[in-house]
């Protein structure tokens, strides 16, 4: 493994823009992989992408044009939609609503994520009241017309929007999920009167019951569109001019890719673009782990994202919140907690140690970066404890300074708590790992899963340093760490199928629908399936490469919330059985013969790409040899231990290690606890058998 593989064209390329680095992964036609990191450029993300491409081309001894012309698949994940929302740098938005409902967006649902935090103000409304204007019309819940559509009311609103310099308009009319005719008429009128203004209709983005969520989603989509779409079009054009022959693909929140041509009407679907790409990696590495149950902790600079996969399937949700704004879009169910390498540690007014939620970001970053940061972070603690070594990382992009890390922890944590610097650093690590533990428990135990039955996958640049401790706390016996842990999401992009999600509100009693005839449900899917197949065909997927998966949002009558159930059948008995299986897992009981209501019909249209194959390396029978030794804090019981340090790039299939040990990889650093047993897998990744504490 000491020599980098010579890659064979054509390539698949995945690019993930993070706060500090832009990651680029290149996979060749036989599964060999190369990974590169370039500094991100927040002011112009395109430059960060191009820098990573230039770095990759140079390492492959070619030029950018040749590199891109040999690329068959270029997939991009970006936080630009999320950052636009977080930084409040979106468009000036106008909103058209049914007459009498202009305040629904601001009233919200009066629900709080933390019910006791009742004094915290709601986030700023993205559309001020004077730009929330009425349309004379009214539909009943079944879609029938109560008050006819009046185009003159749209014309009056358009005059106000023009005078106020509105850049994008959202349309959300009452019950448009049942009948989109009035929204379509309003959009056509606006396109005629204001041809240069971006217009989004809720029936195109989120055609589901729930007026507030539908309105919020449509407004967010309009808010981010004017920044996201031009960036993507500019990047796509730039790549095409440099030799890329196929259309740029983007990763959506649902974990699937979508072409640049199709994303234009729904850029809000990119808000979880980066983290959702990890699903592609989990599917790939599942082959190597030999486990059908995987649970990943991806720990980066600011957060830890937890995802569960069982038998190749991940939980999905359509209720996500970004900075207090609700979006009703299909998304991978990812649980996120503020626990990353840049998480800031402090002592509060009561003299208690805190970790987060504030982070140091990439600038100034942790104190050890030497960029002006003075407050201690998790990275500083890892450096003080010997788990990270001082010096340059990522080709010299950053350099860790031990003295600055010691000073920060001593000043802000050790002295206020009356502790030594190593004890303070150990406390920071233990507290953060408790936060990670709670995040995993929320994503597993609270969803009816036993985490001990899963293989824990530790990834992200910082994840492998927390993996063994987290696995021990959870009671997991198996830990898996990909060699590409530091570019986990970028690699996942290379193994992500295309995906489009469709949803249709369809309020019906399951048993009544069955008694009405066996074709009622099938007929309800017909229009959705036709639209889905048309889009897949347009993107080049037909035959067995075009896969449709049906699903339902179901609930017992009288309950408020629905449960998503994937089920290809259209008969009541099979749908009921699938619903009760999920319900039993979540709540521990079912209602025998209880009346079940169908709220939404769902359809996932998947364009299947050829799955990446694992490139199996030849086994090496020699024992691994450490490159150095240094004192490393292993755990509370062991303290500092003289620990061997191995160069991960020269470890190969079949080699074994027993902890304690440190393994330094190209994109991450691993730690083995005392007694943990590591085996290099067939694909050259790390499988660790965790030694559980006897007291656990």
Image (cartoon, rainbow, N blue to C red):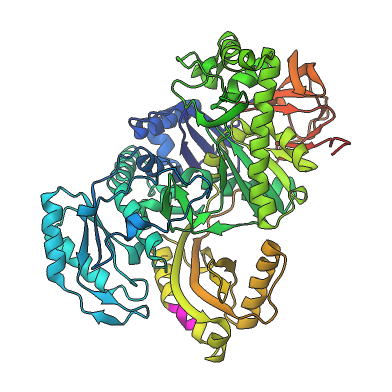
Q: Is residue 280 left or right of residue 242?
A: right
Report the front residue among 633 and 147: 147
Q: Residue at x 52, y 20 (%)?
A: 366
Is residue 423 shown to the viewer in this render? yes
Q: Is residue 136 left or right of residue 494?
A: left
Quarter that holds the C terminus: top right
Position of residue 496 measured from the top left corner of the image (x, y, whole percent): 53, 51
Let me know if residue 524 is in the magenta part. yes
The boundaries of the magenta stretch are: 522-526
From the viewer's perspective, is residue 425 above or below residue 121? above
Let me know if residue 408 is in the magenta part. no
* Residue sticking out furthest to the top: 403
Report the front residue among 78 and 530: 78
Position of residue 675 measured from the top left corner of the image (x, y, whole percent): 85, 29
Q: Main secondary structure of the magenta part?
A: helix
From the viewer's perspective, is residue 305 above or below residue 63? below
Quarter that holds the N terminus: top right
Q: Is residue 330 left or right of residue 480?
A: left
């Amino acid at each position: 493994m000491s020599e980098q593989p010579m890659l064979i064209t054509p390539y698949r390329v995945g690019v993930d823009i993070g706060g500090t680095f832009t990651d680029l992964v290149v996979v060749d036609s036989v599964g060999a992989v190369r990974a590169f990191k370039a500094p991100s450029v927040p002011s112009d993300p395109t430059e960060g992408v191009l820098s990573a491409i230039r770095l990759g081309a140079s390492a492959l001894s070619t030029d950018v044009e040749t590199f891109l012309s040999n690329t068959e698949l270029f997939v991009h994940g970006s936080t630009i939609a999320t950052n636009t929302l977080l930084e409040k740098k979106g468009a000036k938005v106008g909103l058209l609503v049914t007459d009498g409902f202009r305040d629904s967006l601001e009233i919200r649902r009066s629900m709080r994520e933390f019910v006791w935090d009742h004094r915290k103000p709601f986030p700023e409304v993205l559309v001020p009241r004077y730009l929330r204007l009425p349309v004379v019309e009214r539909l009943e819940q079944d879609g029938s017309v109560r008050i006819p559509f009046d185009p003159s009311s749209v014309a009056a609103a358009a005059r106000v929007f023009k005078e106020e310099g509105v850049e994008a308009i959202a349309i959300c009319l009452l019950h448009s999920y049942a009948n989109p005719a009035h929204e379509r008429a309003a959009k056509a009128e606006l396109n005629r009167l204001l041809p240069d203004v971006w217009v989004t209709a809720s029936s195109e983005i989120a055609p589901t019951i729930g007026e507030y969520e539908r309105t919020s989603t449509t407004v967010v989509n309009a808010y981010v569109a004017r920044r996201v779409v031009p960036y993507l079009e500019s990047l796509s054009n730039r790549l095409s001019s440099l030799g890329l022959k196929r259309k740029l693909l983007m990763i959506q929140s649902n974990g699937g890719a979508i072409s640049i041509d199709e994303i234009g009407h729904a850029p809000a679907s990119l808000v979880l673009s980066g983290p959702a790409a990890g699903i592609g990696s989990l599917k790939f590495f599942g082959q190597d782990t030999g486990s059908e149950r995987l649970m990943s902790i991806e720990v980066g600079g600011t957060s830890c994202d937890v995802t569960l996969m069982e038998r190749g399937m991940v939980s999905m949700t359509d209720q996500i919140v970004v900075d207090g704004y609700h979006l009703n879009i299909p998304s991978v169910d990812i649980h996120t907690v503020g626990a990353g390498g840049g998480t800031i540690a402090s002592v509060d007014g009561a003299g208690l140690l805190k970790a987060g939620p504030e982070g140091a970001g990439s600038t100034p970053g942790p104190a050890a970066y030497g960029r002006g940061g003075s407050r201690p972070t998790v990275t500083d603690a890892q450096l003080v404890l010997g788990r990270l070594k001082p010096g340059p990382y990522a080709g010299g992009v950053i350099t860790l300074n031990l003295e600055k890390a010691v000073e920060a922890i001593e000043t802000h944590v050790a002295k206020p708590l009356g502790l030594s610097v190593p004890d303070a650093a150990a406390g920071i690590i233990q507290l953060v790992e408790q936060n990670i533990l709670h995040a995993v428990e929320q994503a597993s135990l609270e969803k009816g899963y036993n985490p001990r039955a899963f293989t824990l996958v530790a990834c992200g640049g910082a994840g492998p340093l927390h993996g063994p401790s987290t696995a021990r706390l959870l009671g997991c016996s198996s830990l898996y760490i990909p060699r590409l842990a530091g570019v986990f999401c970028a690699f996942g992009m290379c193994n992500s199928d295309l995906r489009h999600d469709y949803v249709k509100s369809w309020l019906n009693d399951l048993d009544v629908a069955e008694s009405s005839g066996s074709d009622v449900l099938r007929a309800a899917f017909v229009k959705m399936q036709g639209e889905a197949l048309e889009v897949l065909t347009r993107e080049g997927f037909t035959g067995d490469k075009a896969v449709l998966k049906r699903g339902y949002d179901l609930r017992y009558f009288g309950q408020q919330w629905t449960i998503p159930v994937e089920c290809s059948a259209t008969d009541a008995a099979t749908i009921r059985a699938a619903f009760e299986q999920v319900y039993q897992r979540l709540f521990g009981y079912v209602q025998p013969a209880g009346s079940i209501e169908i709220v939404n019909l769902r359809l996932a249209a998947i364009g299947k790409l050829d799955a990446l194959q694992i490139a199996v390396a030849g086994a090496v029978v020699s024992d691994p040899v450490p490159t150095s030794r240094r004192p490393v804090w292993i755990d509370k019981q062991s303290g500092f231990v003289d620990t061997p340090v191995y160069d991960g790039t020269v470890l190969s299939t079949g080699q074994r290690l027993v902890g304690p040990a440190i393994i330094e990889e190209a994109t991450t650093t691993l730690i083995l606890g005392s007694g943990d047993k590591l085996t290099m897998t067939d694909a050259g990744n790390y499988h660790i058998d965790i030694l559980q504490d006897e007291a656990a």
